[in-house]
Image: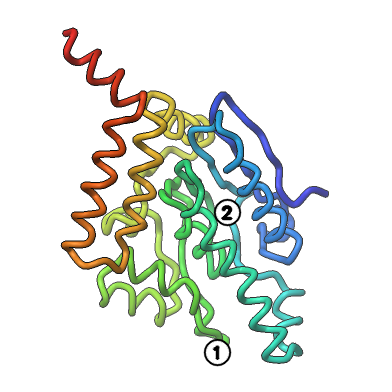
Amino acid sequence: MNTILIETVGSIRLLTLNRPDKRNALNDDLIADLKDALREADGDESLRAVVIRGAGKDFCSGADLSALQKIATASYEENIDDARSLAELFALPRKLRVPVIAAVRGRALAGGFGLALSCDLIIADSTARFGFPEVKIGFVPAMVAAMIRRNMSEKDAFATLTLGYEMPAVELSGIGLVHGLFNDESFDKDVLDFAKQYEKLSASAVQMTKRLLYDIDGLTFEEAVELGAQVNATARMTDDCQKGIAKFLDK
């Protein structure tokens, strides 16, 4: 069985985690296949957005049993290689040219929550629940800390990472972590309609804005403004901007 189902609707690439009997738990094959699918999508210039979703009732429950068994008996060197493979997946959505959207229904736990956080946007239905239960078994939600810290206040981040509880989508929506809440019955259609908003916008502007947003991480204020000036000047020279200005002036 394919661990990732790939479908393209217009300019939207849908990537479905396809281990519903395992609540789409992460194993080596799924991680490798999802990385391949994201890289392939990045090379398709016809795409305007990528959606990651889960087959069945849950988005992704984190590491599966076989992965945990492997962790328990592995050496430090084996564990660091394994952790870096997952870290590579978490870093990949930010590197894609187009927006990557996590469409979450059911549980997004541990590495599954990390996968959702690695995307540019999270949308969810009312069944969605998020959390990092790792601390209950002596594990540290370590790689996701970088994403949580960039998306939450320090106090919220501390509570989310250390208390181990599950949070409903509506709670995360209140702090800006979940961008859209949709009906359970029409969720798939609503997800596609949400992603299709990018078909109506300038592809070059969206891509340059995404890159700028992440590139200013770690810069001083002055450096970030200077980088913005450079991107602004570059954007003015694109076909989309030239045509947009001409259309505006013709009104």
Which amino acid type corresponds to the residue marked 1 in the rendered image? Gly
* Picture coordinates of residue 188, whole percent (x, y): 53, 35
Q: Which residue is mark 1?
A: 138
Q: Nearer the viewer, residue 250 or 162?
A: 250
Is 171 left, or right, of 134 in this rendering?
left
Which amino acid type is marked by label 2? Phe
Q: Is residue 133 left or right of residue 221?
A: right
Where is residue 206, by image quadrant? top left
Closest to the observer: 185 or 5?
5
Per the image, label 1 sits on a secondary structure element best described as: loop
Residue 219 rendering spot, x and y as whole percentages: 27, 66
* Direction from residue 74 to residue 246 in the image, left or right: left
Check disc 2 and report the residue beneath it. 59
Residue at the far top in the pictured view: 250
**Residue 142: image location, x then y, percent:** 49, 79
- Looking at the image, is mark 1 or mark 2 earlier in the sequence? 2
The residue under the point 74% across, 56% down is 21
Q: Which mark is residue 177?
A: none
Image coords of residue 65 (percent x, y): 73, 74
* Residue at figure coordinates x 65%, y 55% from the top left: 35
The scheme the figure's colours follow is rainbow
Q: Total number of numbered labels?
A: 2
Residue 77 in the image: above or below residue 44: below
Residue in the image at 67% along x and 83% along y? 79
Q: Residues within 10 Å of mark 1 (few under 14, many from 20)?
A: few
Q: CA distance from mark 1 to mark 2?
A: 24 Å
Above/below status of 125 relative to 9: below
- Label 2 environment density (alpha carbons within 10 Å; few <14, some 14–19, many ≥20): many
